[in-house]
Image: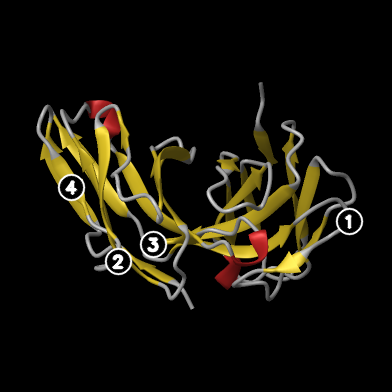
Amino acid sequence: AQTVTQSQPEMSVQEAETVTLSCTYDTSESNYYLFWYKQPPSRQMILVIRQEAYKQQNATENRFSVNFQKAAKSFSLKISDSQLGDTAMYFCAFMKPTGNTGKLIFGQGTTLQVKP
Amino acid sequence: NAGVTQTPKFRVLKTGQSMTLLCAQDMNHEYMYWYRQDPGMGLRLIHYSVGEGTTAKGEVPDGYNVSRLKKQNFLLGLESAAPSQTSVYFCASTLTGLVGTEAFFGQGTRLTVV
């Protein structure tokens, strides 16, 4: 069974600085997708970034980028130039292709606080 | 441009009571899901549906039932609520089940069972 682990329950960063959130996963699949979702205090889940396992190039979306290490089964999220609006809980999630069900397996979440 | 809408947003139930959570999406998505979010455990899949009239069990289905009578609606029922079902419930939908498809979430329902 696939598992996703986020070992940092809470993190904080000063505004404008860079922070990296860690995620590891376990799977025997060769093709899959990994996601980072953001959940601000409003509770609304927002897709931040996604990565296909077959792509060697790390995904980037403006200030957000990932470091995808397939062999190590690691998928970290780097937030550059942190802003107060980045304060949220961040979830790492895994989606496998088997069955084409679109089911997500989530990590425990990391609460990030951006300090002014 | 509503996306995924959940009703209600908050609810307090007494042990043994029943209730239904409603999820509605206006994006013509085929797939719909119910997750629950608990502290330190992330989101876990309760039930899901791959199309109108279909339902399937997820990771934590016990104590819940679902129905998908219309494509745009996915209902989650609790027949006899228990304190262990105190949680935040999220509905999500995807256009397809293909790997990599983006899930769109509702704003969640905070349920407390006393």
The amino acid at mark 2 is Lys
Answer left or right for B104 relative to A71. Answer: right
Chain of the residue where label 3 is placed in the rendered structure: A
Looking at the image, do the residues carrying marks 3 and 4 touch, with CB atoms under 8 Å apart?
A: no
Q: Which mark is residue A107?
A: 3
The answer to whether tags 1 and 4 share a subunit is no
Measured in 3D between alpha carbons, the distance from the residue under mark 1 to the one under mark 2, in whole angstroms, is 37 Å
**Position of residue B76 measured from the top left corner of the image (x, y, whole percent):** 74, 57
> Which disc is residue A73 wearing?
2
Element type at mark 2 = loop
Q: To which quarter of the image does residue A66 belong?
A: top left
What's the mark number on residue B53? 1
Q: Residue drawn 66% across and 21% down? A: B1
- Residue at label 4? A20
Whole-number angstrom distance, CA of label 3 to CA of label 4: 16 Å
**Where is B83 relative to A43, above or below?**
below
Q: Earlier in the sequence, mark 2 or mark 3?
A: 2
As measured in the structure, the alpha-carbon distance from the residue carrying label 1 to the one carrying label 4 is 43 Å
Tag in front: 4 or 2: 2
Alpha-carbon distance for marks 4 and 2?
Answer: 16 Å
Task: Indicate which disc, 3 or 4, sits on the residue closer to the N terminus.
Answer: 4
